[in-house]
Image (tube, rainbow, N blue to C red):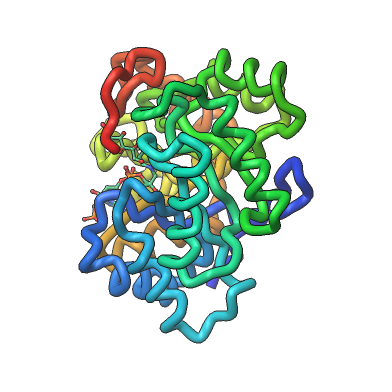
Amino acid sequence: MATVPNLTLNDGNTIPQLGFGVFQVPPEDTAKITGLALDAGYRHIDTAQMYGNEKGVGEAIAASDLSRDDVFITSKLNNGFHEPDVARKAFDQTLADLQVEQVDLFLIHWPLPTRYDGDFVSTWKTLIEFQQQGRAKSIGVSNFQPAHLARLAEETDVVPAVNQIEVHPFWTNEAARAASHDAGILVEAWSPIAQGGVLDDPTISEIARSVGRSTAQVTLRWHVQRGDIIFPKSSSPERMAENFAIFDFELSDEQVDAISALDKGEEGRTGPNPDEFDYIPD
Ligand SMILES: NC(=O)C1=CN([C@@H]2O[C@H](COP(=O)(O)OP(=O)(O)OC[C@H]3O[C@@H](n4cnc5c(N)ncnc54)[C@H](OP(=O)(O)O)[C@@H]3O)[C@@H](O)[C@H]2O)C=CC1
Ligand SMILES: O=C[C@H](O)[C@@H](O)[C@@H](O)[C@H](O)C(=O)O
């Protein structure tokens, strides 16, 4: 089985560059699907309070023969839970549902609290508390724009380990990627295949033919060669295996550049723009 590279975060901890995401995996199916992903070799699971399926992730890991140190687990604080005492309770519940004493990475899901008058800077201080308690090994953010990152740098001493943002060939999100890199923050690319939206693209299809791989594999390999962390979601064991098999071939620099050139700017987004998003689910 190919080895997934580990990347080093700015706090010295490491993270597997390829993981498995469980957004939109129904809670009742999550233990089974996460178990299949572990069987396929994935050792990094990306979940969130918002997804309602942390329990299933915890059950799958507990039922496996893997030890706690073998699996990197990320979860995220939901938008309605930013008020410090509410965040503390929600985080307690996350650890209980995942059946762990510590998550490897805990993120602010969106810089957009609901049901709270404070803002994401005070929320970040609550995450720093979780890290100091040893209950979140690393902490980071998600859907942070350059201005959000700048405020954290001005007002707090802890730099997020990652920024999890929408990135794929149709929306390369270069401004947020560059601001993250400039601050020493690794980028996690969410919806890495644009939920399937890039798979029929003619340029990617042509490259896929020339390297003898699928368009999903070529797209995921493009992310890896750009240094981003990815966790494609699939409910099928065949596609889980396909998405995992991306470490035994390489794209040329020209092929990487040709895929990057598919960026459609804002038109290419599949999810909300954090600067314009005025409603997000609790
Ligand atoms: N922080 C945030 O705000 C967000 C974070 N995320 C994270 O990113 C993860 C991945 O993003 P997600 O939105 O799920 O989208 P992805 O880009 O991973 O695409 C998932 C979709 O593509 C299909 N698919 C997967 N692999 C293949 C393949 N090899 N060939 C053809 N189709 C395939 C899946 O179908 P099937 O299941 O049938 O295989 C599913 O419909 C999430 O699970 C979550 O962890 C996602 C969105 C926002
Ligand atoms: O992690 C998942 C994402 O944040 C997702 O919940 C949102 O992007 C959602 O699709 C929306 O449109 O509000």
Say if 242 sits above or below 59 in the image. above
* Residue drawn at x 67%, y 27% as measured from the top left: 181
Seen from the viewer's position, the closer of residues 214 and 241 is 241
Residue 57, image x, y percentages: 39, 67
| Relative height, residue 232 to residue 83 (above, below) | below
Name the image quarter holding the C terminus. Answer: top left
Q: Is residue 267 left or right of residue 249?
A: left
Q: Residue furthest front?
A: 85
User: Dividing the image into four equal quarters, which quarter contains ligand 2?
Assistant: top left
User: In this figure, what is the number of numbered marks?
Assistant: 0
Q: Nearer the viewer, residue 246 or 144?
A: 144
Find the residue positioned furthest to the bottom. Answer: 65
Q: Position of residue 174 (x, y in %)?
A: 52, 19
At 47% across and 35% down in the image, what residue appears?
A: 83
Q: What residue appears at the point 59 percent right and 25 percent down from the top-left corner?
A: 121
Can you say whether 75 is above or below 35 in the image? above
Instruction: Tell me where residue 22 appears, x and y as whole percent.
Output: 34, 55
Quadrant of the image occupied by residue 103 = bottom right
Q: Nearer the viewer, residue 78 or 74?
A: 78
In the image, 35: left or right of 249?
left
Using residue 22 as the reference point, say whether residue 155 is left or right of it. right
Say whether residue 226 is visible.
no
Q: Quadrant of residue 4?
A: bottom right
Q: Residue at x 64, y 72 (%)?
A: 69
- Where does residue 110 sit, x and y in percent of width and height? 43, 31
Residue 133 is at least partly visible in this image: yes
Closer-to-camera residue (244/79): 79
Quadrant of res 220: top left
